[in-house]
Image: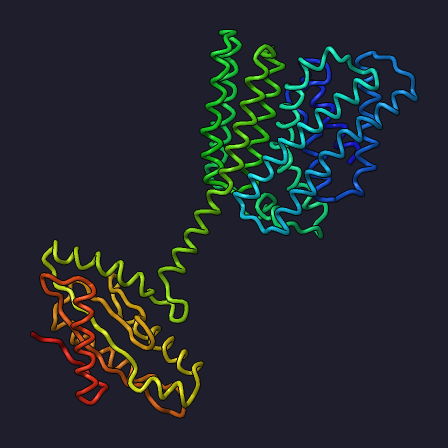
Amino acid sequence: MIISWLAVWFISSLVEYTHHASVWFPPAGLTFATLFIVGVRAAPVLMIAAILATVLTNSNYQINLANLDVIQSGLLFGLAHIIPYYLGSRLLLWLTETKQLTLPQSILSFLLIAAVSTLIATTLVLSALIVSDMMSIQEVSETWLPFWIGDLAGLIILSPLFFSVLRHVYPKRRFEILKHVGNHLHIPSPQYKYKIMTSLTLVILAMVLANLTQSIDSSFAIFFLVLPHMWIACTENAFYNIFSLALSSVLVVFLVDYLDLMDFIMVYQYAINVVATNALFAIAIPTLTADNQQLKIKVFTDSLTKASSREHLVLQGEIELVNCKRNNQSLCMLVFDIDHFKKINDTHGHNTGDEALKTISNNVKQLLRPFDLFGPFGGDEFVLLLPNTDGKTAMTISQRLLIAINNIQIIDGKNLSTSIGVAKMELGDNFDSLFARADQALYQAKNSGRNCVFQHSE
């Protein structure tokens, strides 16, 4: 951990554009992720890394502090750096685990906590540098904002990537939020490499343009990086979204230094933060889509029989009625129930009654065409809507249903029986009026001795 922390610190020092302020500060992301995963027992290791970084800073800037003063400065820097990120990581852990936040809420919490944690860390670290005589108070006004934005970029871009890596270093530590950012089981799509190439090419073109024109207006072209990363975020696994985000950001940081674009540094700092924020929020889009699909399935599917729910029958039924009228096609509705169903429940129990309903549903669905609509309508009553079907065909289908249900045995070798009512759509019908006539035909079938089919006629 010490070596890793010093390695990412060294990377940040390569792209400093003013004393103690880098284009981004990856150690902020590593510290936050480590404290989130490992907890407070990682603090001593991070403190050692902070002291060693201070020793190197003292040498690089030729500040020439005494050894004891350097160690004291390192301790102050370590405390100022670790405490805000420890508190922020614990708050994020508490919110995501205790409050059971949704993924969008978790992402929003992470971004807000990142902004506040890095601001507090910036204030404390700059104060520590002033107290330890490693920075003058006059330098603060021009340093604090790029210092903060650089820390923020390092945290929001790289923390999710470090989360994913550390999750596999510490596999026994399970956190709810990590299941969204640490999943390596899903491979990227075959188009992923082209998406990455598009993103990196756009970075190069935008930054070369800024270099050639030396115009701050041209530097804003980097914000177009939002487009390929939204494309990646909406179509790829969360890990590959995070990985591509880190890759693009590394290239931006490298080209800022290589193409001598330090005059536009604040544009690029804000750009990578904006791109990262959009990309992280976009992680939630596939999850929201999946959740909406699950909700749609729950609303449109009856939980017991797995056939269409009553809501779906009515909604889709109205659509089918309109379509059949527009195309001058026939449409019929069948309404049927199980004869003496209450007796089955009273004699054998509701579990047996539920099994009867499920068995009927499974058997009926095997007889249907792809465009037929079928589902329970209440109690033991079922509705079957037959688009593009005339009355004669509907009666044939009804007889098949009658035979199929008669062949179902529930208990004691007794077969089920059913009564079926059939009604044909008329010009002024809606779902309710058609159902009323089919239901009336059902009662006529019951009055005719049950276990038969009766078609409504005017």
The quarter in which the N terminus is drawn is: top right
Residue 440: percent from left, percent from top? 17, 77
Q: Is residue 387 above or below residue 1?
A: below
Residue 16: percent from left, percent from top? 68, 16
Residue most extreme to the left:
458
The quarter in which the C terminus is drawn is: bottom left
Residue drawn where x is 51% and y is 37% of the image = 281
Residue drawn where x is 88% and y is 24% of the image = 71
Q: Which residue is nearer to you in this view: 303 or 188?
A: 303
Q: Which residue is nearer to you in this view: 163 or 132?
A: 132
Q: Is residue 283 above or below residue 213?
A: below
Residue 313: percent from left, percent from top? 28, 63
Residue drawn where x is 65% and y is 49% of the image = 175
Residue 97: percent from left, percent from top? 63, 50
Q: Is residue 312 above or below residue 247?
A: below
Q: Which residue is nearer to you in this view: 284 or 139?
A: 139
Q: Quadrant of residue 448 in the image?
A: bottom left
Residue drawn where x is 61% and y is 45% of the image = 182
